[in-house]
Image (tube, rainbow, N blue to C red):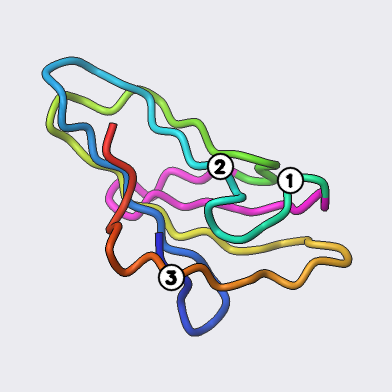
Amino acid sequence: MRHLENGDIAVAMFNMTDSEKSGFFPFVAAGINSSCSCVLDFCELYTDEKMFEVRDELVTEPIPPHGCKIYRAEVRHCPAQKITVVDTTAAGGTAL
């Protein structure tokens, strides 16, 4: 996960197992408080699959063994919440 200069959030999910697994990205990992009713729109960058008005967490369709999904998330609505940038330079994504 990485915060981008324009306010969007990049999320990479990797399945390092030998079986299909769903990806999971809780918004709190991006510094978004779960009680703030924030809404994000996600676009998977390889397939252009779009998911609109996602709240609290992103759960993906199963990711193939040793596969990945890379998303760009746009914050659509986040009342009374300033998103805190979390240092994620050591973690490039979510390993399943």
Image: 13 above or below 88: above
Q: Residue at x 50, y 31 (%)?
A: 59
| Residue found at the very far bottom of the displayed protein | 5
Q: Nearer the viewer, residue 69 or 43?
A: 69
The span from disc 1 to disc 3 (Cα, nearest Å) is: 19 Å
Instruction: Give the image location of residue 8, x and y in percent.
Output: 53, 70
Q: Residue at x 24, y 40 (%)?
A: 14
Label 1 Cα neighbours within 10 Å, binned few <14 / some 14-19 / many ≥20: few
Q: Circle 2 sits on which residue?
A: 26
Instruction: Give the image location of residue 24, x and y in percent.
Output: 45, 34
Mark linked to residue 5: none
Label 2 Cα neighbours within 10 Å, binned few <14 / some 14-19 / many ≥20: some
Dots 2, 1 in contact, CB < 8 A: yes
- The quarter of the picture where the N terminus appears is bottom left
Q: Secondary structure at mark 3?
A: loop
The span from disc 2 to disc 3 (Cα, nearest Å) is: 16 Å
| Residue found at the very far right of the displayed protein | 80
Q: Circle 1 sits on which residue?
A: 34
Instruction: Give the image location of residue 50, x and y in percent.
Output: 50, 46
Q: Secondary structure at mark 1?
A: loop
Mark linked to residue 87: 3
Instruction: Give the image location of residue 35, x and y in percent.
Output: 82, 46
Question: Which corner quadrant of the image does residue 18 belong to?
Answer: top left
Q: Nearer the viewer, residue 38 or 42?
A: 38
Q: Earlier in the sequence, mark 2 or mark 3?
A: 2
Q: Which kind of residue does numbered mark 2 sit on?
A: Pro
The span from disc 2 to disc 1 (Cα, nearest Å) is: 9 Å
Q: Which kind of residue does numbered mark 1 sit on?
A: Ser
Image: 37 above or below 67: below
Q: Which kind of residue does numbered mark 3 sit on?
A: Asp
Q: Which residues are magenta?
A: 36-51
Q: Secondary structure at mark 2?
A: strand
